[in-house]
Image (tube, rainbow, N blue to C red):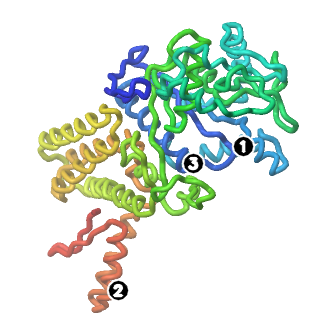
Amino acid sequence: MKIFNTLSRNKEEFKPIEDGVVSMYVCGPTVYNYIHIGNARPMIIFDTVRRYFEYKGFNVNYVSNFTDVDDKIIKKANEEGTTCDVISERYIEECKKDMEGLNVLPATTHPKATEEISGMIDMINTLIEKGYAYKTDDGTVYFRTREFEEYGKLSHKNIDDLEAGHRDINVKGEEKEDYLDFVLWKPKKEGEPYWDSPWSEGRPGWHIECSVMAKKYLGDCIDIHAGGEDLIFPHHENEIAQSESANGVTFANYWMHNGFLNIDNKKMSKSAGNFFTVRDISEKYDLQVLRFFMLSAHYRNPLNFSAELMESAKAGLDRICNAYDNLMYLYENARNDISPIEEAKNASAEYIAKFESAMEDDFNTADAISAIFEFVRYINQDVNDQTGANVLKLYIDKLSMLCGILGIIVEREDKIPDEEIERLIDERQVARKNKDYKRADEIRDELLKKGIALEDTREGVKYKWV
């Protein structure tokens, strides 16, 4: 299995620290509002990575945090005249609802930053003792960026170029030794939540939170650290600097980052009027469509969101679900228990191998979905009302297995019941007998929109999912 490692900018063979175990940390959302579709992309992508590892027999310790103390949370609390706890707890619960709608599995651990403050204070103390951090007169603690010689190794930024970009900036009131130093601890301001520390009553900087939570729940050195491309610098770069300086070992062996999400080829922003929450999308589409859309492109590529592309994703997902529905219908009404099965086994194995090959090449979900489409095409051509139940069950199991690895649910809750289909077919027959061809055509078209094609035969009307 090969993973593109942002650190080396190469695909590398994945070798876990411990055989059969994967330790994985994924940066989670800041919970001050409903999650937007940009937040949803890494959730879906790395949930799929986790699912594939589990399919291959790995025990995955998957940690994804909630940032529940932040300027945006404080601002929201002040606007509503309430506390940060009320805001963060509200939107953690809303986030979990959206994750469930996206079929994102709960993490092994979902730590909250506010519950790990003591660990952050301990790591900051260690950094100060080792000379990597310092306190200023106002109670702020900064990390000495230049003390970490490998700073810039993840983002591939040269520290001298970074310095040149800051050289003419005068930050009033700051007591930094160097413009590149970043905050580990900040003193409280009026109306802000705070915690006691050796340096001041205050709260941690953003970067230290993830370093501490990854260390506590996964260890000093972890297999995979992941998140959006926007986190490479400075967040992940600073995590590396803090963690490796404090712990004295490599922080993460593999760094994975998903590409940006644009809206109609433009950056998503509230000011541009193209900002969509997952909740917004759920009002128009089943969130399975959004998940399928996100997986239809390679995770490292930029992804463009548009109504046309979502409709295309819906049509693609319907193709797969219709094939599954047809298999279930044929299975439940199978005339034969047994048919020759070797050819079906061989064909299934071929498409499963294609799927696995795509996933093991840096989790290429786009090609994995193509393999599923090929499998569906083969199934649709191979099965009919004479196919044995054993063959139909094989196809049902293998198709649902592949889709399940991608977190795609093929059994639709809104599937029209067989009794309703039969009722409409009977109504159509009566309409035809009464020469009400307009109504007969309306029923046929109504069923076709739901993925059900009618076929008039000598034995009567038959239907199948298309």
Where disc 2 sits, the SS reads helix
Q: Nearer the viewer, residue 310 or 93?
A: 310
Asked if disc 3 and disc 1 are in contact, CB closer than 8 Å, the reply is no
The tag earlier along the polypeptide, 2 or 3, is 3
Disc 3 to disc 1, C-alpha distance: 20 Å
Give residue 1's position: percent from left, percent from top: 31, 26
Using a 10 Å C-alpha cutoff, classify the residue at mark 2 as few (fewer than 14 neighbours), some (14 to 19) or many (20 or more). some
Which residue type carries mark 2? Arg
Q: Residue at x 55, y 23 (%)?
A: 159
Q: Which residue is mark 1?
A: 72
Using a 10 Å C-alpha cutoff, classify the residue at mark 1 as few (fewer than 14 neighbours), some (14 to 19) or many (20 or more). some
Callout in the foreground (3, 1): 1
Give residue 88's position: percent from left, percent from top: 72, 41
Callout in the foreground (1, 2): 1
Count of numbered badges drawn on the protein:
3
Q: Residue furthest front?
A: 168
Q: Which mark is residue 439?
A: 2
Q: Residue at x 84, y 34 (%)?
A: 189
Q: Which mark is residue 98?
A: 3
Which residue type carries mark 3? Asp
Give residue 342's position: percent from left, percent from top: 13, 39
The tag earlier along the polypeptide, 1 or 2, is 1
The tag earlier along the polypeptide, 3 or 1, is 1
Residue 199 placement, left or right of 8:
right
Which residue type carries mark 1? Lys
Q: Which mark is residue 269?
A: none
Residue 232 placement, left or right of 121:
left
Disc 1 to disc 2, C-alpha distance: 57 Å
Where disc 1 sits, the SS reads helix
Where disc 3 sits, the SS reads helix
